[in-house]
Amino acid sequence: MSSKNIQVIGMEIKELEKENYDRVNFIYKQGIETNLATFQNECPTFEEWDKSHLNFCRFGMFDDEKLIGWAALTSVSSRCVYSGVAEISIYIDNNYKGKGIGQILLRHLIEQSELKDIWTLQASIMQNNLSSINLFKKCGFREVGYREKIGRDKFGIWRNTILMERRSSLPKLI
């Protein structure tokens, strides 16, 4: 096992590769269908997904060789002063929700992001997505605000989001 991979409860966290994108897309589509996870109505192509996410801290949780969840970071700004601030995307296959996989994957992403000098992680979560809000709270995030009617869901209804943030506790980063 490579030092980049970690094994947990018979599963393994590995870096995502382009070959994993079909499952990334499948899991993301499940998120779209919940109407709780994203304002997007269609899955991006791999090229769009690849361009919109940072080229590091892209992780998947694998059960055997099957991707069952993924997490990745997006830059919040192109300005260099915000190079240590990133937004999290995390999605878990519906068949694996409620098993602690999101928490394991999110904690791994936090740890690895700090190794890449990310000092602030943020997430914008739909206000009624209580399971995601609770997941982030368990992993050390706090609510720092909300955005009223920031986007329309797949039915065209304006929705609020909760802005959550986690500051690094590493002295070298803060």
Image (spheres, helix red, strand yellow):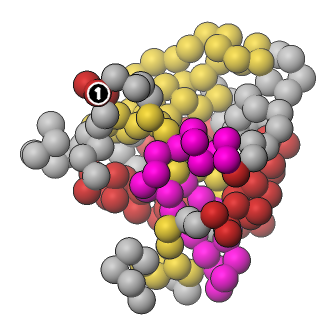
Query: Left or right: 172 with respect to 87?
Result: left
Q: Quadrant of residue 33?
A: top right
Q: Quadrant of residue 60?
A: bottom right
Q: Is residue 135 visible?
A: no
Most extreme residue toward the top, as rendered? 148
Q: Which residue is painted at 49% across and 25% down in the image?
A: 163
Local SS, label 1: helix
Q: Which residue is painted at 70% across and 77% down in the image?
A: 66
* Residue 103, position as x, y percentages in the image: 49, 59
Q: Residues within 10 Å of mark 1 (few under 14, many from 20)?
A: few
Q: Which residue is painted at 63% across and 26% down in the image?
A: 127
Most extreme residue toward the left, as rendered? 171
* Residue 79, position as x, y percentages in the image: 34, 23
Above or below: residue 147 compared with residue 108: above
Q: Is residue 105 visible?
A: yes
Query: Left or right: 1 with respect to 44?
Result: left
Please tell me how many numbered marks the rendered image carries.
1
Query: Looking at the rendering, in which quadrant would you find the C terminus?
Result: top left
Query: Looking at the rendering, in which quadrant would you find the N terminus?
Result: bottom left
Instruction: Kindly identify the amino acid type of the residue bearing the numbered disc 1.
Output: Cys
Above or below: residue 96 compared with residue 45: below
Residue in the foreground of this view, choosing between 56 and 141: 56
* Residue 92, position as x, y percentages in the image: 66, 58
Give yes or no for residue 57 being in the magenta stretch. yes
Q: Which residues are magenta?
A: 47-71
Badge 1 is on which residue?
A: 80
Q: Quadrant of residue 94?
A: bottom right
